Image (tube, grey):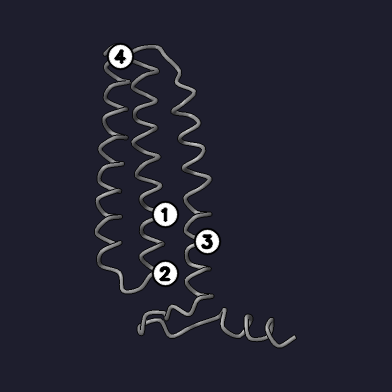
Amino acid sequence: MSMTVIGELLAAIFIIAGAIVSLISAIGALRFPDVYTRSHAASKSSALGVLCVLTGTFFYFVFADEYISIRLLLGIFFVFLTAPVAAHAVCRSAYRSGVKLAEKNPRDDLKKVLWQEQHD
């Protein structure tokens, strides 16, 4: 087996895995009950799916074309960096604007902390 075939196989595995993870993420974003769990599904697993697809594409270009794409590396870096931060910002603003947790969630650890913060 040549390096090109191995690289294409590795790229295909990463791209297919990324597509599967993204599909599971989309299903989770539709099925979960509230904005907090939906945000978790949309940010964490879709970021992993996009990272797998971009990594597979990077491997393809490295092994098949012998080309290192700085744009793909930057894309991987920025998705890895911004997806969790964006999800945190969405959940924080939802909580502070009064969006209720799902009824199945028995704990609200942040409620007591925010109450103390407001009354100090």
Residue at image position (49%, 23%) is 70
Residue, x 48% and y 83% (percent of image)?
107
Residue 74, labelled with which disc? none
Mark 3 or mark 2: whose residue is earlier in sequence? 2
Quote the CA–CA distance across marks 3 and 2.
11 Å
First in sequence, mark 4 or 3: give its number.
4
Decide: is 6 above or below 27.
above
Q: Classify mark 4: residues with Cα within 10 Å, few (<14), some (14-19) or many (20+).
A: some
Q: CA distance from mark 2 to mark 1?
A: 12 Å
Residue type, label 1: Lys
Q: CA distance from mark 4 to mark 1?
A: 31 Å
* Image quadrant where one finds the C terminus: bottom right
Question: Farthest residue toward the right?
Answer: 120
Left or right position of 41 against 97: left
Identify the residue position indicated by label 3 in the image.
89
Q: Nearer the viewer, mark 4 or mark 3?
A: 3
Instruction: Select label 3 or label 2 by which is in front.
Output: 3
Q: Which of the 4 image quarters holds residue 9?
A: top left
Within 10 Å of the Cα at label 3, are there few (<14), some (14-19), or many (20+) other Cα atoms? Answer: few
Pinpoint residue 101: horizontal percent, then vertical percent.
Answer: 41, 79
**Cα–Cα gap, marks 4 and 2:** 43 Å
Q: Residue 44: give its label.
A: 1
Where on the picture, by quarter, is residue 41?
A: bottom left
Q: Is residue 62 above or below residue 10?
A: above
Q: Position of residue 77 (x, y in %)?
A: 51, 37
* Residue topped by disc 2: 36
Q: Earlier in the sequence, mark 3 or mark 1?
A: 1
Instruction: Determine which residue is flagged by label 4.
Output: 4
Crowding at mark 1 (Cα within 10 Å: few <14, some 14-19, many 20+): some
Of residues 79 and 18, the one nearer the viewer is 79
Check disc 1 and report its element: helix, strand or loop. Answer: helix
Which quadrant holds residue 117?
Answer: bottom right
